[in-house]
Image (spheres, grey):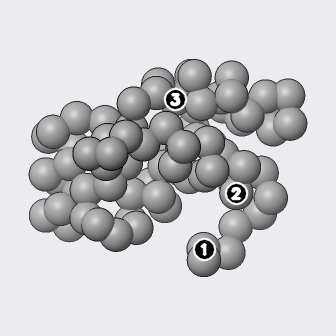
């Protein structure tokens, strides 16, 4: 429901597809970049920006890459 440009939506879908049942991101940002290429040419900073949006979704902590990041997201 976030209003994003088409490239960000594609990145967001790839990120969401890489989240496991426990809510953790299982792929590296480089792997996400490879997944969306050649449709979207995104660098790590662009992927991190979309990840920050995904990490604001419910439940709190979703999209974290580590336990520490998950706790930090929950505390925000």
Left or right: 66 as drawn, with respect to 37: left
Check the picture and name the quadrant holding the C terminus.
bottom left
Residue 31 position, x and y percent, is 57, 22
* In the depicted structure, whether residue 68 falls above or below residue 7: above
N-term-proximal mark, 2 vs 3: 2
Label 1: which residue?
A: 2
Circle 1 crowding by C-alpha within 10 Å: few under 14, some 14–19, many from 20 = few
Residue shown at 33%/45% (left/top)? 21
Residue shown at 40%/67% (left/top)? 57
Residue 72 position, x and y percent, is 17, 53
Residue lying furthest right: 39
Residue 11 position, x and y percent, is 66, 46
* Alpha-carbon span between mark 1 and mark 3: 21 Å
N-term-proximal mark, 2 vs 1: 1
Label 2: which residue?
A: 9
* Alpha-carbon span between mark 2 and mark 1: 9 Å
């Amino acid at each position: 429901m976030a209003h994003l440009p088409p490239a960000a939506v594609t990145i967001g879908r790839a990120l969401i597809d890489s989240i496991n049942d426990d809510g953790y991101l299982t792929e590296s940002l480089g792997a996400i970049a490879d997944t969306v290429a050649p449709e979207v040419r995104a660098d790590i900073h662009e992927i991190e920006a979309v990840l920050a949006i995904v990490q604001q979704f419910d439940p709190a902590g979703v999209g974290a890459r580590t336990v520490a990041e998950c706790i930090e997201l929950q505390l925000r």
